[in-house]
Amino acid sequence: MSLIVLASDKGSPGVTTTAVALAGVWPRRAILAECDPSGGDLVYRTPAESGAPLNPNIGMLSLATTARHGLSAHQLEAHLQRMHGGLELVVGLATGDQSAGLAGLWTALGRAFDSLPDADVIADVGRVDATSPALDLLAGAALVVLVARTSAEQIAHVRDRALSLLQRVGGGTATAGGGLGVPIGVLLIVDPKQRARVTAQVDELLRNSGLPVKVIGTVADDPDGADLINGRGRGRLDRTLLIRSTREVALDLSRMYSAGSQGPAMPGQMPQPLSQPQPTPPPQSQQAPPPMQQMPPPQPQPAPGTAYAPPARPQQPTAAPRNPRPSRPTEPTVWPGEQPPAPRPPYDVNGPFPPGRQPPPSAHEGFTSVTLGGGPDPHHGVAAPPPGLTPVQHEQRDPRDPRPARGEIPPGPGGHRAGPPSPGGGR
């Protein structure tokens, strides 16, 4: 329904990447058309929706054959492919030599793109100059956008290119009517931190040059987002600065130049939305009477000179009191200065134990700590021997036996066994 053309004057400012991003976030159906006479790039950058490569023979090359016998808007559907992500695409020419087959057909292509009934066409024509055959395509556009970066030389080239285009196809401004030709605007690729300052400087430069051209928006200079669009890198494309800034530009341009709008808005004025038909009310005689509503009873008015009192609420029937649940017995609380209660005697399954009788040992008594082997520790509660020595196993023996006990070190010459001292204090 509208043809919006993106172009550049010199260098590689990123026209193709901007066109892909703009068509991808367009608020209604959009078709991306690679109309660069020197050849397209997307057939080498991105695959088709199925994962296979895009077919270079279906697109501008097939349109050139169809346009020889006449071209209408409904014939464009047969020359579309879906790139990865679902965006509809008219694949560009493979080489610049193939543009000779489109000689004399650029004007018909522009009219067909602009009259597509249910979609807008975002066309990428690459670099344009005075000899570019794409100038005939620009003549049928609703808007021509010159994409540029913020370097001084690129801004100067864009100013000169805008003047050249105004002499051929341009007229009016991108935000206000009044010209007989196509409005021209400038889209800047800029650092988001310098967007306001650079936009004001470029607008002042264009105004001082006497050109009816203005900056229509800015796109963030985001190399990571550009890599994601071109099939390189990983991440969420919808969270990049490139997509978020391009979405703002797409909303503004679609309101001003999409079909159904009331034409370009005046400077500082937003385009008015389309008026919706209002339903016709039925005749008064056919309207059903409103249902009767029950009016609340009148409230008593206070006597003069008395304070206002809220109306009394009706008495609700009180429910019968419930019987309190028996509380569980709890242990008596011991307060400071009191003696704790005497412990209860242990109970057996047959009743309390009589005085003097002890209850059987608990099932957990007599167990010691478990060793790493899984059984009870035999040395639990016994002091560990010094390092390098093993515990001596005690045995019952006769104290009058002169032989040393097993594991005992026998005394050497002149030695004696340890024992109680003699009554005389000597050996």
Image (tube, rainbow, N blue to C red):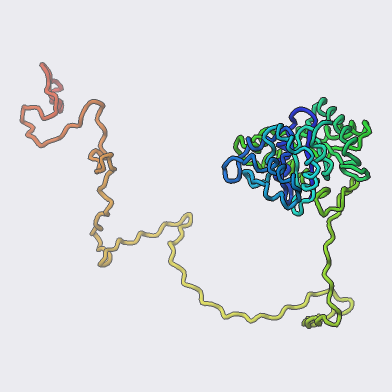
Eyeballing the image, is 296 above or below 265? below
Q: Nearer the viewer, residue 385 or 80?
A: 80
Identify the residue at horizontal 43%, vertical 62% (top origin): 331
Q: Nearer the viewer, residue 166 or 408?
A: 166
**Picture quadrant of residue 124:** top right
Looking at the image, is 110 positioned above or below residue 402? below
Q: Residue at x 62, y 37 (%)?
A: 231
| Above/below status of 390 relative to 30 | above
Residue 350 position within the rendered picture, expressed as x and y whole percent measured from the top left: 25, 67
Q: Position of residue 20 (x, y in %)?
A: 70, 40
Vertical comparison of 359 with 305: above or below? above
Tell which of 179 and 27 is nearer to you. Answer: 179
In this picture, residue 278 sits left or right of residue 387: right
Q: How many marks?
A: 0
For residue 147, say whether it is visible: no
Q: Where, quadrant-wise, is the C terminus in this rendering? A: top left
Classify residue 398 by image quadrant. Answer: top left
Residue 53 position in % (x across, y down): 59, 40
Instruction: Please state the horizontal and vertical placement of residue 52, each as a whole percent of the image.
Output: 57, 42
Which residue is at 83% across, 28% downward? 157
In the image as oriented, which residue stretches furthest toward the front?
Answer: 69
Q: Residue furthest top?
A: 413
Q: Is residue 418 visible?
A: yes
Taking the image as shown, residue 412 lies to the left or right of residue 173, namely left
Q: Quadrant of residue 411?
A: top left
